[in-house]
Amino acid sequence: MNNQDEGLKREIGIWGLSANMINIIIGSGIFVLPAIITGILGPASIIAYAFCGLLVLLIMLCYAEIGSKTTSSGGGYTYVVAAFGKYPGFLVFLIGFIARICAIAAVANALVDTLAVVFPVFHSYTIKFAFLVLLFFGFAIINILGVKKGVGLVKFNTIAKLLPLALFIVVGIFFIDTDNLKWTATPSLQHVGEASLILFFAFTGGPTGLIVGGEIKHPERTVPRAVIISIVFLILFYIAIQTVAQGVLGSRLSPDMASPLAVAGQVVFGPIGFTFILLGTAISMFGNVSGQTLNTPRSLFAVSRDGVLPIKAFQKIHKKFATPYVAIMGFSTLGFLFAVSGGFRTLAVFSVAGALLGYATVSLAVLKFRKMPEMRTKGFTIPGGIMVPILSIVICLIFLYHLKLAEMLSVAIFIAMASLAYWGFNRIKKATIKESGIKNQLKSINDDNATSSR
């Protein structure tokens, strides 16, 4: 596996990569989760945030190690190909790619619905359609104009989405009633596990931020540092949000509350607080779409680059801007079509299980890398031997065990269909190579005949 993507520029540093991962991870979930987690654990909710954050950190450390050693674009796909070959890599790519298409389409629709609460004009289908065109293709154009511009937009969006939440924390501290934070009982391990399973997906998304591996400066140092910075920051940030929300609302913070942070914001900032936090939710979703547009097309570029997907156009690099412009436009077009058609609802069911399988496979790849002489001494290695990768695999398997049977069956069916697709692509590729070989042989014979006749 090449460690350099020809034509791509390495312009993403530690803070750009950290902002990239934070931007993708913080979606709309944190704006509603405090009520759900409080419904399970009460004032002891911060235990779930700390515990779940630790579990996610273990998984992300595996990505930090392997991402510092395999520095091409493609993220999980590239890591798995380097460890186990193209077929497992293709499955990881396709499951992740479809999941991200569904996610960006769902977030875009949720963004329109959120804006419609404040601006009723967004209830119009025409306005919604026009907005989605501007959203998807506007971000596509910005990212085609250069990775530096794409990362700059991500940095701006990260600050914009963190600002309302940071103000909520700083100002909200003065509205906390400490009685609301007193534990009435120690939560059971079962309840902590239940809350952590729900919270787990508020911490995921970090691996998507590493798909731009071919454009990261000094990845052997940048990747592990950015991973640790982003996950530790999010653990502390989420705990602070939960503490303020719990301290301000107390017993009013119930699972039935649709917008707990917006309600708490009304207490903290007055009548305008509800709208302020609601717009913060919209900005968060806006940033998530921009982050996906920066990252996910690089995986489409990678499978085309490696010949796994027989569509050569996706590996094209813009001569002036050094970006995979066809892959970016292709991803944005698919996202737009899924968003306006509602197709994401049909395929979204397998995304959770698919993500967990991807995490487990990358954790296995870490163990394989450590046995490969050319990889063993490169980049960053997690301290503690095999303990962290093994724990990461166990965590993924436990979460998979607790998913619904329908989700697992959907993944099994999807893997079977993806395998058939891979077989079909291979047949096409072999047929193309064979045809090309015959043509070359005929050309060689004709050239020889022409030479002989002279």
Image: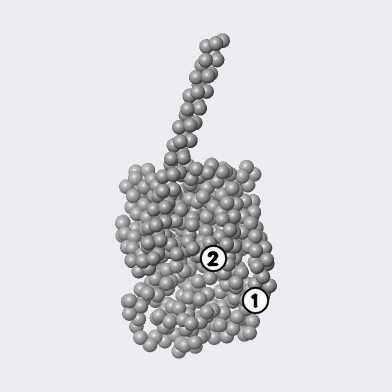
Residue 218 at x, y = what percent?
Answer: 49, 50
Q: Residue at x 51, y 16 (%)?
A: 448
Q: Residue at x 49, y 55 (%)?
A: 97
Residue 304 percent location from the top left of the image: 50, 45
Residue 249 seen: yes
Q: Amino acid at mark 2?
A: Ala
For the residue marked with disc 1, what is the amino acid? Val
Q: Quadrant of residue 273?
A: bottom right
Residue displayed at 46% across by 56% down: 96
Q: Along the line of sight, which residue is nearer the eye, 84 or 20?
A: 84
- Residue at 54% x, 13% y is 451
Number of on-image labels = 2
The image shows residue 216 at horizontal and vertical percentages of: 52, 51
Q: Quick one: which residue is furthest to the bottom in this view?
A: 179
Judge whether 143 appears above or below 193 on screen: above
Quickly name the residue at label 2. 106
Tag 2 secondary structure: helix
Residue 333, position in %: x, y?
Answer: 59, 55
As drawn, 114 above or below 91:
below
* Quadrant of the rendering where the C terminus is positioned: top right
What is the CA distance from the residue labelled 2 to the residue labelled 1?
19 Å
Residue 161 seen in render: no
**For the residue carrying disc 1, how many other residues have a C-alpha within 10 Å: few (<14), some (14-19), or many (20+)?**
few
Which of the marked residues, 2 or 1, is nearer the chain's N terminus?
2
* Residue 251, placed above or below residue 122: below
Q: Quadrant of the N terminus?
A: top left
Comparing marks 2 and 1, which lies closer to the viewer?
A: 2
Q: Please determine whether, in this image, residue 176 is positioned above or below residue 427.
A: below
Q: Residues within 10 Å of mark 2 (few under 14, many from 20)?
A: many
Residue topped by disc 1: 118
Viewer-nearest residue: 454 or 142: 454
Q: Identify the element where label 1 is drawn.
A: helix
